[in-house]
Image: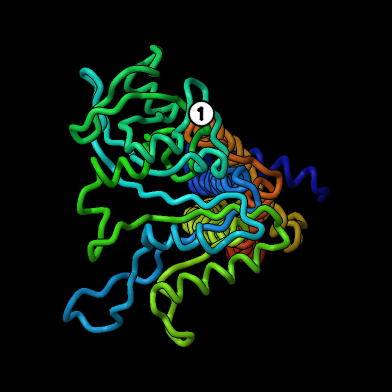
């Protein structure tokens, strides 16, 4: 019997039980749609993170706190687990060669008010170099200046998202906002940068002079052992070939400032943009694989459903199988017919699932959270998986049908 004839018989058998066929395919549809959507979203998050980090250039080193502080009597190391403003000043004095800028920052979340509008926003105290090292463009007004820091001026620069939330479409520059009850004049609004890739946005921010924050806003939360602390120190290296040298110098200077010996564990981290990119990409890829594996479980469940229905179909069509064998059908022909039915169910479910998965990915993109990246390899993977499920779970019912003897099958009630 020709393959085309087997295919027609398989289609007729599936159409004879439309509702059962649709319900059987449902597990495959859900599984494939989930695989395609999650892989696309995962690739989109990775691309977003990559773009965000690379936008700051490849010449940026970030110094951040490392080991957590152990409380008194808590055992373990008592080494400092903070970065201090004094560390920034030390680097500023000591790092001269190949340095374009050194930028300290302290960030915390505060309630920001204007009129009847009130939002919890990340407030960052920093210096004028922050704008350049983090690739922000000013849409209105200006950024923080050295003069603002020296005078501890109560001025603020708003991210595009915060400006929209507080002022709608109105001009924000020159207006007054309140941060934790302290009045600040808005002197600038930044261009939109978009999502950070983790469900948040770098546009939902407020920037103030760091010295103003220490003197008028942050309070005791920004000090430890009577020393001012920072969340991070960014070092922009003028020559990318000197990245390793500068990184080693930073490690040496801060290790000495924190009174750590060469054998002590570092209580801070010095990471380049490529280090950050590698770490974050690895995390997102692991998450994507993990979520894809969870989605694959629904494909397996769908495959089990297909095998179950095909076993029922073999039982219902025992007499038909016996009759076909009695008139000369071979084992291979019977096996091929039932295998075609199983694979057809699986592939139809796979195609529908791929379309649903693409639709879900497009909905995520349209939501504006981030752009999901639909790639041919994710579609091919899902399609191949669906095909493999159909063959794997269809073999046993097909083999069982092929091995029925004509006499037993014809007598079956």
> Could you tell me residue 131's position as x and y percent?
52, 38
Q: Which residue lies at the image location 79% right of the left edge and 43% below the top edge?
A: 4
Residue 299 x, y percent position in the rendering: 52, 54
> Does 226 sit above or below residue 190?
below
Decide if residue 103 is in sight here. yes
Of residues 110 and 280, the one nearer the viewer is: 110
| Circle 1 crowding by C-alpha within 10 Å: few under 14, some 14–19, many from 20 | some
Q: Is residue 205 left or right of residue 375?
A: left
Please give the name of the residue rendered at 65% of the width and 68% of the height, measured from the top-left corner. 245
Q: Is residue 82 placed above or below 190 in the rendered structure?
A: below
Q: Secondary structure at mark 1?
A: loop
Q: Please name whichever residue, 194 or 154, is drawn nearer the observer in this view of the structure.
A: 154
Residue shown at 52%/74% (left/top)? 252
* Quadrant position of residue 202: top left
Q: As rendered, which of 119 and 344 lies closer to the eye?
A: 119
**Relative to residue 326, is residue 251 drawn left or right?**
left
Tell me: residue 376, above or below residue 310. Answer: above
What is the count of numbered marks?
Answer: 1
At a point 42% along the width and 63% down the height, the residue shown is 87
x, y percent for residue 375: 68, 43
Of residues 33 and 205, the one drawn nearer to the viewer in this rendering? 205
Q: Residue 405 location in percent, x, y?
A: 64, 66
Q: Which residue is mark 1?
A: 192
Locate residue 280 relative to residue 71 in the image: left or right: right
């Amino acid at each position: 019997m020709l393959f085309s004839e087997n295919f027609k018989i398989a289609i007729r058998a599936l159409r004879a039980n439309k509702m059962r066929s649709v319900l059987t395919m449902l597990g495959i549809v859900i599984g494939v749609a989930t695989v395609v959507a999650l892989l696309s979203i995962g690739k989109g998050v990775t691309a977003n993170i990559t773009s965000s980090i690379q936008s700051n250039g490849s010449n940026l080193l970030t110094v951040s706190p490392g080991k957590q502080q152990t409380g008194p009597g808590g055992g373990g190391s008592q080494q400092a687990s903070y970065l201090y403003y004094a560390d920034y000043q030390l680097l500023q004095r000591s790092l001269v060669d190949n340095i374009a800028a050194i930028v300290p920052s302290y960030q915390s979340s505060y309630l920001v008010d204007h009129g009847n509008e009130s939002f919890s926003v990340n407030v960052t105290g920093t210096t004028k170099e922050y704008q350049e090292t983090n690739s922000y463009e000013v849409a209105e007004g200006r950024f923080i200046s050295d003069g603002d820091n020296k005078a501890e001026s109560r001025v603020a620069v708003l991210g595009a998202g915060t400006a929209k939330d507080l002022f709608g479409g109105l001009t924000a520059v020159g207006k007054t906002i309140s941060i934790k009850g302290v009045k600040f004049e808005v002197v600038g609004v930044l261009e939109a940068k978009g999502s950070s890739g983790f469900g948040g946005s770098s546009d939902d921010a407020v920037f103030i002079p760091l010295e103003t924050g220490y003197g008028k806003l942050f309070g005791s939360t920004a000090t430890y052992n009577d020393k001012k602390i920072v969340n991070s120190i960014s070092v922009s290296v003028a020559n990318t070939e000197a990245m390793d040298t500068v990184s080693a110098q930073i490690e040496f200077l801060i290790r000495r400032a924190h009174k750590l010996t060469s054998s002590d564990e570092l209580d801070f981290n010095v990471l380049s943009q490529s280090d950050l990119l590698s770490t974050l990409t690895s995390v997102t890829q692991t998450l994507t694989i993990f979520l894809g594996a969870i989605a694959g479980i629904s494909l397996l469940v769908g495959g089990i459903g297909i095998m179950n229905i095909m076993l029922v179909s073999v039982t219902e069509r025992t007499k038909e199988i016996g009759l076909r064998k009695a008139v000369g059908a071979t084992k291979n022909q019977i096996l091929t017919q039932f295998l075609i039915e199983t694979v057809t169910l699986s592939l139809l479910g796979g195609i529908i699932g791929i379309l649903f998965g693409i639709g879900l990915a497009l909905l995520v993109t349209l939501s504006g959270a981030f752009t999901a990246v639909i790639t041919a390899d994710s579609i091919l993977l899902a399609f191949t998986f669906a095909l493999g499920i159909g063959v794997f779970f269809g073999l046993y019912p097909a083999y069982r049908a092929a091995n029925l003897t004509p006499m037993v099958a014809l007598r079956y009630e």
